[in-house]
Image (spheres, rainbow, N blue to C red):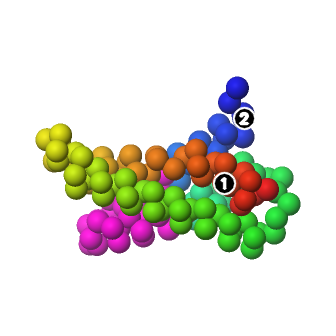
């Protein structure tokens, strides 16, 4: 059975991912791909932290400082996953499949979605325990 908390996490993550994804497209207008991913990650990270604190993990016993520290550490791991998946897809897998139109955008969308499960459990047990 899927918990209500997990569903709330997925909804909040979806909203934060949209902020991340949309800002990456905007940043890409004046930044290279990987720096744009990192800058967009900061937008998504801030959005996700605020919404998760207020809507998903309200009963946390950690201080805000501890929550922010663990949230950032967990998400740095997620950033590495996002960059690796995005680059592998955009630079190798999608072109090998003949998909070159919008490869960066498609790859980044998959990269952003990749760490959902690992992030939920890490935030549940580390960031907001």
Is residue 108 covered in magenta?
no
Left or right side of 54 for 92: left
Which one is nearer the viewer's eye here, 72 or 93?
A: 93
How far across and down, in percent of the image, does residue 106 sit?
30, 46
Q: Quadrant of residue 87?
A: bottom left
Give me the C-alpha separation between circle 1 and circle 2. 17 Å
Image quarter where the N terminus lies is top right
Q: Which residues are magenta?
A: 17-45
- Residue 30 appears in view: yes
What label sits on residue 122 in the rendered view? 1
Which one is nearer the viewer's eye here, 31 or 61?
A: 61
Q: Residue at x 46, y 46 (%)?
A: 113
Q: Count the labels in the image.
A: 2
* Kind of element beneath mark 2: helix
Q: Residue at x 75, y 70 (%)?
A: 66
* Kind of element beneath mark 1: helix
Residue furthest to the top: 1
How far across and down, in percent of the image, does residue 82 sit?
42, 56
Q: Main secondary structure of the magenta part?
A: helix
The residue beneath circle 2 is 4
Is residue 26 covered in magenta?
yes
Task: Judge the density around disc 2: few (<14), some (14-19), many (≥20) Cα neighbours within 10 Å.
Answer: few
Q: Residue at x 30, y 54 (%)?
A: 88
Q: Quadrant of residue 129?
A: bottom right
* Nearer to us: label 1 or label 2: 1
């Amino acid at each position: 059975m899927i918990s209500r908390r997990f569903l709330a996490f997925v909804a909040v993550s979806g909203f934060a991912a949209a902020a991340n994804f949309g800002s990456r497209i905007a940043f890409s207008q004046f930044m290279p791909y990987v720096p744009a991913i990192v800058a967009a990650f900061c937008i998504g990270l801030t959005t996700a932290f605020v919404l998760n604190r207020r809507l998903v993990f309200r009963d946390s016993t950690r201080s805000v400082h501890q929550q922010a520290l663990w949230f950032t550490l967990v998400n740095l791991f997620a950033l590495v996953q996002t960059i690796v998946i995005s680059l592998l897809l955009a630079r190798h897998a999608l072109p090998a499949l003949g998909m070159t139109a919008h490869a960066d955008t498609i790859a980044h969308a998959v990269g952003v979605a990749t760490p959902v499960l690992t992030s939920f459990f890490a935030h549940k047990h580390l960031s907001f325990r």
